[in-house]
Amino acid sequence: MEKILYSNANIFDGNKIHTNSSLLISDSKIVAFDKASNFESNIFDRRIDCTGMLITESFIDSHTHLLSFSSYMNSPQIDNGEINSKSDLIQQIENIVNNSKEYWIRIFGLNNTNSFNINKNDLDEISTTLPIVIVLDSLHGNLLNSKALEIIGISEYSNEPTGVTFDREINSGNLSGYIFEGDHLIERYIPKSSMSDLNDQVGQVSKIYQDNGYSLINDASINNNFIKFELLCNLASSNSLIPKIIFMPGFPYLNEFSRERLKYNSTIGSVRLGHCKIMLTTSSGKTVPNFETLSKQINESHRAGFPVAIHAVDNLSVKTAIKAIGKNPFENDRIEHSSELYDEDIQNIKNNDIHISTHPSFIYDRGDSYLKDKNQLDLNSLYRIGSLINSGVTVGYSSDAPVSSVNPFKGIYANFTRCTKSGNSLNPSEKVSIIDTLKMLTTFNKTITNSENLKSIQINSNTKMLLIDMDINNIDIHLLKNVNSSIKWIN
Ligand SMILES: [Zn+2]
């Protein structure tokens, strides 16, 4: 086997950077790691000069949505950059509908935080005969036209299933067409892709994860049921591109897994079961579900042997999640997003040993809309990643793709600069160093995903390593956000 020396690199060992160091790789294994000057020329067959480059263990994405990402990549999308008025938006949707050959038309990327809100009447003007579903870019809601509502059996008199919201117009009280947290009501009517199409689509998205340096991804979709788990296991066994997957069962489907005697950490091929995902949102000043129901859900998950991962974005939800976990302690419980935090929340997260998975790239991708919509007090509570890390909380990096960018450099950039897409600064006191973001992508994510917490660089291990064209000691930080093709896998 050829011995290749990657020499003179900055090598990140999961904790700190070793400058002017070299890594000897043979047969996909790490054979030696030392200061560059300690390698004699007779111990390697080939030398690759890595001056000014970074070598690190490959990355983990602790919260993403593989199947949604694949649907998103293979469906028409709204181009929000091209929209300046409500009529621009409607025109775009109309063009997509007119050009589509599908019966069900599903479009991704509606941003319902902008000022030109549309509703089902606008979609009905485009078509009353074709069902149209527009997926919100948050992935937590859909806008349907009347035909789509009719097909899925929702009328003005339908009752809302638990956890689902049928939004209504303030003036008339009629359905607006927006359904929040109701994917499962819609999905079963949308024609499925064939297994071979799905294989290609998931392969294509897996290539994106791979190009961005991820060897392990954690699928955190609330609609993760047993059928989806089986589907992913099948896809993963036939497609070598797919990174290792941790699959979080959604709380509503937990019994389907228990029935199959599957537990936390049960592994089939390269797919492993992770935390139980629980949804928690705030509507009209109250959390849904309320504290008692949330506590019951946490308890039930723990009794089934699963730690929980609670979706909590706004401050009331995060406070409620912390309190409920505090009452039902269990190893490895997590809160997802934790976007709005005050000092006491950070202290309580630390005191209750709760892990966090959050998305630095939101600062870049969504920061401008936060700056437009929130007041100063709220802004100071946003994405307090620096304070969390400084308080000793284990904070994992995640993309939440396709909601936000899968490119880790965007997150590294946003964490370091706190800059938004249009160059504004969001809560700059929460800056995080590049090394700490690398820790979030590797060491911290190993802890929160309960992955083997071996040292990154272990002799004779086949830990997958990346070579990145990024000079950590001499970096033009503003170039970082555009970097995306400089990652090479070295073993
Ligand atoms: Zn998510």
Image: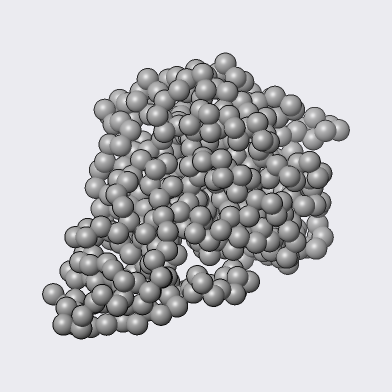
> Is 310 rendered above or below residue 47?
above
Residue under the image location 42 percent in, 25 percent down: 330
Residue under the image location 28 percent in, 68 percent down: 34
User: Picture quarter containing residue 172?
Assistant: top right
Can see residue 436? yes
* Viewer-side residue, 281 vs 451: 451
> Is 10 rendered above or below residue 321?
below
- Dividing the image into 4 quarters, which one contains the N terminus? bottom left
Can see residue 187? no
Tell which residue pokes out farthest to the front in this image.
38
* Viewer-side residue, 480 vs 476: 476
* Viewer-side residue, 366 vs 454: 454
x%, y% of residue 18?
A: 39, 66
x%, y% of residue 402?
A: 54, 54
Tell which residue pokes out farthest to the left in this image.
1
x%, y% of residue 197?
A: 38, 59
Residue 406 lies left or right of residue 34; in this view the side is right
Residue under the image location 22 percent in, 67 percent down: 32
Residue 365 lies left or right of residue 335; in this view the side is right
* Viewer-side residue, 171 vs 365: 365
User: Picture quarter containing residue 300?
Assistant: top left
Residue under the image location 41 percent in, 70 percent down: 19
| Display colour scheme | one colour
- Dividing the image into 4 quarters, which one contains the C terminus? bottom left
x%, y% of residue 241?
A: 32, 62
